[in-house]
Image (cartoon, helix red, strand yellow):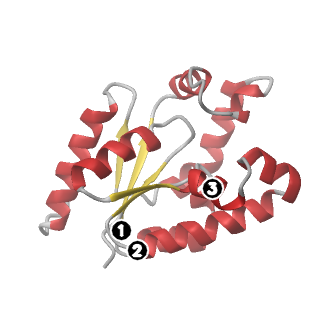
Amino acid sequence: MPGNVVLIGLSGSGKSSVGRELARRLEFRFVDTDDEIVATAGKSIAEIFRDEGEAAFRALESRLVQGQCAAERRVISVGGGAALDPANRAAMLAGNHVVRLDAPDEVLVERLRDDPAEERPLVKVGDPLARMRDLRAQREEVYAIAHRRVDTSGSPPGAIAAELAEWIGSRLRGGTG
């Protein structure tokens, strides 16, 4: 049983920031699948989409998600669309703890706008808030696979990670939490 923690959710929900802190607390390895894809491909996600198409990106993403979900002692932050693939969902649920991080759409868009280190195509569209609402509507059903949903809008990443570390510890000790 892998027992990894898989973080799912929309862009800007805090998967990377919470994930890094959670991995530190659990003494697990942190894996951001988007970062791994960029490192493997040697180009940005936007370049992969442009040069090779979405299907090529999703194939890379699926191989990585499924491989990491089968490993052990990982906190895995997956891209917002990774859970759309049924095989990825099955891998996520195969003995792992799936956590959905979420926040109101307005908060997500603001976080993406405020992140100077990231190229965020979502905020470059005409109406980012409408796009975020569309993505939420498209993904709501698949995000329901999560064992736990956490609203990240009211707490810093460290506090959320502490709460999740306690919950994971309880599950590992046999609780259902």
State the image coordinates of residue 7 (x, y, percent, origin top left): 43, 52
Q: Which residue is mark 3?
A: 39
Q: Is the residue 126 above or below the residue 61 in the image? A: above
Q: Residues within 10 Å of mark 3 (few under 14, many from 20)?
A: few
Question: What element does badge 1 sit on?
Answer: loop
In which quarter of the view is residue 53 placed?
bottom right
Q: Is the residue 152 above or below the residue 44 in the image? A: above
Frontmost residue, 8 versus 42: 42
Q: Is residue 28 left or right of residue 144?
A: left
Question: In terms of sequence position, does the residue under pointer 3 or pointer 2 come before the other?
Answer: 3
Frontmost residue, 47 versus 144: 47
Separation (CA) of disc 3 from disc 2: 19 Å
Mark 1 and 3 residues: CB-CB less than 8 Å, in contact?
no
Q: Which amino acid, mark 3?
A: Ala
Q: Which residue is mark 1?
A: 96
Mark 3 and 2 residues: CB-CB less than 8 Å, in contact?
no
Residue located at (60% from left, 24% from top): 116
Q: Is residue 28 left or right of residue 174?
A: right
In which quarter of the view is residue 30 placed?
bottom left
Q: Is the residue 144 above or below the residue 114 in the image? A: below
Separation (CA) of disc 1 from disc 3: 25 Å
Question: In terms of sequence position, does the residue under pointer 2 or pointer 1 come before the other?
Answer: 2
Q: Which amino acid, mark 2?
A: Ala
Q: Which amino acid, mark 1?
A: Asn
Question: In terms of sequence position, does the residue under pointer 1 or pointer 3 come before the other?
Answer: 3
The residue most toward the right is 51
Residue located at (42% from left, 43% from top): 101
Q: Which residue is mark 2?
A: 71
